[in-house]
Structure formats: C-alpha cells, structure tokens
Image: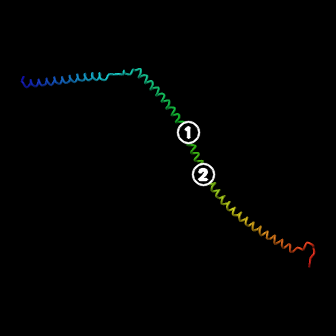
Amino acid sequence: MSGDVINRMVRRALVLVATAAVIGVAVVTVQVAAAWRAEAAPLDTAPVAMSAINTDMEAEAARTTALSGQIDEVAGQLSTLKGAVLTADKAVVSDAESAATLEGQLAATKTTLEKLQSQLKGAQARLVALNKAAARQAAINAAARRSSAAATKVASPPAGGHDDD
C-alpha cells in the first residue's frame, strides 16, 4: 500500500469518527434540553378526565337542544308577525283605496258646493232686486192711494146733504 492510499483511509476514518461524535453530541444535547425543560415547566394541573369531557359534552348537547327549541319558538313568532304584517298591509291597501274614493267624492262635492254657492249668490242678488222692486211698488201704491183718497174727498158731497150753491 502506498502512503497516499493510507492517508486517504486515515482521513476518511477521521471524518467518519468526527461525524459520529457530532451526532452523539447532538443526541446528548437534545436529551439534556428535554430534561431541563421538563424540570423548568412541571405539569401543575392534571389532565382532564374522560368523565369530565363526557359531562361537558352532555351539557353542550342539552344547550344545543335548548337553543334549537328557542329557534323554533322564534320561527313561530316570526310566522305570526309575518301574518300580522300581511294583514296590516292589506288594511293599508284597503284604506288607500278608500281614501282615493273619498278624495274623488270630496272633489265632486266641492264642485257641487261651488255651483250651489254660485246659485245662492245669484238668488240673493235676485232677492235684493225683488225687495227693491217691491219697495218701489209699495211706494207707488201708497202714492196712488193718497192721490185716490184726495180725489175722493174732493168729489164727494159734504156730510150734511146740503149743497151751498
């Protein structure tokens, strides 16, 4: 064997030993760190027992059932409210239709009232004219009676039956 080959073998053996030493040191370091961590952070609380988990699960199942019942109640209330809203909507539509009908009747009544007011003003004007004409006629009649009475006095003989002529 030549010296060159021996040098290579020695180098390979040294690299192999160094690699094994590094792996050994790494394993020891991990074990020491795990032991140190376990001592530094002890487990103060015991793990949860299976019975406690079952009890919690049953409580959550009961809560779920209660919430489902409440949801069903709310759904029933919503259904009732929906019916009430539909009824109220129908009433609003009916009231709107009635209001429209009443507005039409009010407009027609206003038109009739305006016509009647116009006719009333005309009748009042005619009444005033008739009252003036009646007053004039009464004055004419009174004047005619006075004039007729005066003519009757002049034409009638004296009361004693004697005529002075």
Q: Residues within 10 Å of mark 2 (few under 14, many from 20)?
A: few
Query: Split into 4 quadrants, where in the image is the N terminus?
Result: top left
Q: Residue at (56%, 41%) from the top-left corner?
A: 88
**Going by the image, does 10 lie left or right of 29?**
left
Q: Determine the secondary structure under disc 1.
A: helix
Give the residue number, with chain letter if any, for mark 2: 103
Task: Place residue 19 in its image quadrant.
Answer: top left
Q: Position of residue 50 (x, y in %)?
A: 40, 20
Q: Residue at (83%, 72%) from the top-left corner?
A: 150
Q: Determine the secondary structure under disc 2.
A: helix
Give the residue number, with chain letter if any, for mark 1: 84
Name the residue type under label 2.
Glu
Viewer-proximal residue among 142 and 121 = 142
- Which residue, as the protein is rendered here, is positioned at the far bottom? 165
Q: Where is residue 29 in the image (x, y as percent from the top left)?
A: 23, 23
Name the residue type under label 1.
Ala
